Image (cartoon, rainbow, N blue to C red):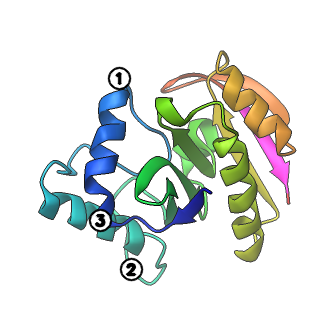
């Protein structure tokens, strides 16, 4: 049975295996270009940075916002990630949204993204948010179904700095 957990160094090998399955960036993971995740020490430091990013008493790196990260796991197997950004900057308002998520290819078509999004919408309510923005590529049918299945209402499709995006709002 899947669960959401805080990022943990003990999943290093499983996370690396998930990265090898993908030939693209995994949304919702919080991986920055300066994060070193190949070594156990670098991976542990990255997982700790992700855990600290939800603490609003601590500063965040330039261009980032406070966010809570969860990993979707079954036992010791990393299946994906989801994050809840506590507020939006200009880039997130235009292209990124409050929530990002991804599921490794071998774990797709099981409803994990839909389940995880529903769980994180509850967390957004707990934080006092009254609505959240989600975006996806116009041709990403799986994300469209996931977002719409959780109550997402399409606001628009627009060109952004990272390409065209469908923008959805979910009232909480």
Q: Which residue is mark 3?
A: 10
Q: Which residue is mark 2?
A: 58
Residue occupying image coordinates x 43% and y 37%? 26
Q: In the image, 53: left or right of 144?
A: left
Which sits in the foreground, 32 or 104?
A: 104
Q: In the image, 2: left or right of 144?
A: left
Snapshot quadrant of residue 23: top left
Residue 64: image location, x then y, percent? 42, 56
Q: Write the start and end of the magenta stretch as one range.
A: 167-171
Please determine whether, in this image, residue 72 is positioned above or below residue 103: below
Snapshot quadrant of residue 10: bottom left
Q: Which residue is mark 1?
A: 23
Total label count? 3
Q: Nearer the viewer, mark 3 or mark 2?
A: 3
Residue occupying image coordinates x 71% and y 60%? 119
Q: Nearer the viewer, mark 2 or mark 1?
A: 1
Residue 168 among those drawn in magenta:
yes
Secondary element type, mark 3: helix
Label 2, residues with CA under 10 Å away: few <14, some 14-19, many ≥20: few
Residue 85: image location, x then y, percent? 57, 59
């Amino acid at each position: 049975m899947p669960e959401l957990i805080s990022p943990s160094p003990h999943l290093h090998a499983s996370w690396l295996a998930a990265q090898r399955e993908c030939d693209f960036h995994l949304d919702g993971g919080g991986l920055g270009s300066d994060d070193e995740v190949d070594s156990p020490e670098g991976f542990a430091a990255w997982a700790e940075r992700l855990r600290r990013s939800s603490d609003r008493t601590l500063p965040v790196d330039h261009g980032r916002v406070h966010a809570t990260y969860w990993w979707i796991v079954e036992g010791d197997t990393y299946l994906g990630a989801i994050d809840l950004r506590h507020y939006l900057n200009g880039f997130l308002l235009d292209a990124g949204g409050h929530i990002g998520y991804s599921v490794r290819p071998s774990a797709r078509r099981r409803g994990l993204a839909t389940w995880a999004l529903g769980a994180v919408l509850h967390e957004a309510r707990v934080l006092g948010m009254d609505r959240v923005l989600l975006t996806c590529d116009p041709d990403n049918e799986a994300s469209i179904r996931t977002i719409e299945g959780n109550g997402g209402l399409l606001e628009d499709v627009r060109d952004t700095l990272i390409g065209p995006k469908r923008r959805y709002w979910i009232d909480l």
